[in-house]
Amino acid sequence: MSASHPESILVASARISGLVSDEQMDYVLRVASYRMTQRGCNLAGAEFDRLIGEILVEQQIVTAYQAEQLAAGRTKLDLGGYLITDWIGQGGMGQVFKAVHQVMGRICAVKVLPLTRLTQESRENFLREIRMQAALDCPYLVRAYDAGQDRSVHYLVTEYVPGMDLRRLVKTSGPLPVQQAAKIVMHAARGIDYAHSKGMIHRDVKPGNILVTPEGDAKVSDVGLAGYAQELSDDPRSKKIIGTTDFLSPEQIRRPQEVGPASDIYSLGCTLYYAVCGKVPFPGGDAASKIRRHLEETPWHPRKFAADLSEDFVDIIADMMEKDATKRVNSAGEVAARLESWVGDSHLMSGAIMSRSPWMAPPPPSENSDRSDEVDEELARSHDSSATGKVTLRPNPVEEPNIPAIENLDQTNYAKVTSSSEHRQPGTVMVVALTLAIAIPPAILVGSIIGYMAAIWFGITGRGT
């Protein structure tokens, strides 16, 4: 059968790669011949390769990714002792593949430094990442298993985490319920706290670097971008802004060489905001605009996007996203501790508001309210110039009478202002004064005098009108 299709790229590549034995290929070709006979067709070229690929995948001889690579004429799908089985995505330092150790059979992730980025600096950074990640052993961080070089390809082998990253989870499912978001970020906070305890900071905490398993557990990846806090001055990247624009802390922007654990906490706060709101804190605009807003503005109130959030939960986000690093939550461990109670069922239906906070939203409009969304948005964005990064939300503006400031009032102006209050009558004041005098015997004389003077005074101002 193979001789009748000498133009088959996939068949030739499969044989060279060693992924498919001669016996397996002969069987696949017989199945393909049978199916073409049943369909009354004789496929060739790319269509024939597509059929061969489908049969190989059905028989679990190769993966769909491997079939695609073989059909493209690629024959080397291994790195060192690891066989590449799928493509996972793009990491902070290069492409990430799913692989299996050919001897141990352990599934893992392999990060490859692209040849297009193979410079002396990139090799040094990649080696730094490998050594840093190898020094960490925490259930909430992606563990490093191995590293090596295959010809000119440098690679890092890490733990494979099934599921998807938090960014993709939110994109797929929408804003997460509080319980789910709290659990994910709590696990991430524990991992980051462990890294901090080893003197490291991550510098690129974001939803894309938090991997979520089907069971809802989370692990932080790309810890290799971290640096030892005391050695940042020796890191060639220390004077560069390292991170993702939507999650940069203000100090990463101002003084990238002086970032510390508090910077990771700010980024994790932005991540928690994204998890429950489905939006980054400062959506839209270019990178320069986002950077400016991280420095100067406060984000939309979370309750604008998730009305059921309680004040206590919003306070956690606010405390993590304080622009002043000295006023943020003290540690990632404290973040985890504060979120822990939200992981259980006790807060799922919590909607009671006991007190107002700087991030507390105004009461929602009633069904017959005609207040526009634009007004809601303006209220949500308003904040005091002296605020420390938290949004200060104000109630609806109330129309006030045109009364000058008290310090500017003289006797003439005061008479003009008070005379415009039609509901104030001398008789009313006298009744109040006499009532007080009767109720409080010692004050009878004082009450009478006050009433008498008030009557005379209102009489004068009445004639002035």
Image: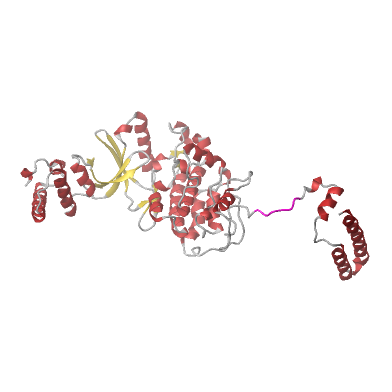
* Residue 171 place in picture, x, y as percent: 40, 51
Q: Is residue 9 left or right of residue 256?
A: left
* Residue 308 place in picture, x, y as percent: 51, 60
Q: Would you place residue 355 above or below residue 264 in this image?
A: below
- Residue at horizontal 45%, vertical 47%? 192
Quadrant where the C terminus sits is bottom right
Residue range highlighted in magenta: 397-402
* Residue 127 place in picture, x, y as percent: 35, 36
- Residue at horizontal 58%, vertical 61%? 353
Q: Is residue 301 visible?
A: yes
Q: Is residue 23 left or right of residue 366?
A: left
Q: Main secondary structure of the magenta part?
A: loop
**Front position in the image: 172 or 247:** 172
* Residue 296 place in picture, x, y as percent: 57, 41
**Residue 422 in magenta?**
no
Number of dots carrying numbers: 0
Q: Is residue 35 left or right of residue 147?
A: left
Seen as rendered, the residue at the extreme top is 120
**Residue 399 in magenta?**
yes
User: In the rendered view, how is the structure colored?
Assistant: secondary structure
Q: Is residue 138 visible?
A: no
